[in-house]
Image: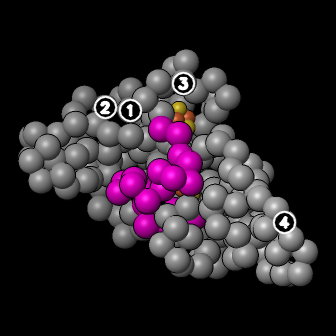
Amino acid sequence: MTSSTTTALRRLRSRVRTGSGRAARDGAATDTRPFWERKTLRQMTEAEWEGLCDGCGKCCLNKLQDEDTGALAFTNAACKLLDHHSCQCSDYPNRWDTVPECVKLGPSSVGRLAWLPSTCAYRLLSEGHSLPSWHPLLTGDPDSVHRAGISVRGRVICETTVDDLEDHVVDWEDL
Ligand code: SF4
Ligand code: SF4
């Protein structure tokens, strides 16, 4: 990473309600697969969309982007609103009052966000992959993402304590 960097986007999990059209509902009546296997991201209801998030918290980390090459790097500096234990936003409904640059993720933007971590459920599904075995939708346990070591729990510091983000670049395998 060179010195020509900019901090980038952070958090996703859109509140966008996506269209669950008639065809999708009719199809669902005879298809017993779980919604993430039988629906596209655009067909999901808001609750289904929200449920896809595994709660890893990695999209709340500050990222750096090289202005010359476009290369991205994650840091271990988390947004000041991130709860480091639950890995959830501590003020999600009002987050834009404090963090106006927080990014809203929607079905149409998933494919354009190169900084989504490789484990992110939205990215995985948009690229045609399956959900990983530790995903809470499969385990029925929200803590499974933490036990699998996929979340940021125990691995981050608050951005307010950081002087230079470039000193905090990380190269985790699960990014
Ligand atoms: S799965 Fe993880 S990276 Fe993706 S939106 Fe949820 S918290 Fe962010
Ligand atoms: S405001 Fe909340 S959702 Fe947005 S980056 Fe910060 S902790 Fe994450």
Residue beneath disc 3: 96
Rendered residue at 53%/40% (across/down): 104
Residue beneath disc 2: 162
Report the magenta residues as a range.
Answer: 103-121
* Mark 1 → mark 3, Cα distance in angstroms: 17 Å
Residue beneath disc 4: 25
Residue type at mark 4: give it: Arg
Q: Give the side of residue 174 with respect to residue 91, left or right.
A: left
- Asked if ligand 1 lies within 8 A of label 4, the reply is no
Estimate the x, y position of residue 72 in percent, counting from the top left.
25, 53
SS of the residue at dot 3? helix
Residue type at mark 3: give it: Trp
- Asked if ligand 2 lies within 8 A of label 3, the reply is yes
Residue 140 within the segment the image draws in magenta:
no
Is tag 4's residue or tag 2's residue first in the polypeptide sequence?
A: 4
Q: Give the side of residue 3 with respect to residue 103, left or right.
A: left
Residue type at mark 1: give it: Glu
Residue beneath disc 1: 159
Residue type at mark 2: give it: Val
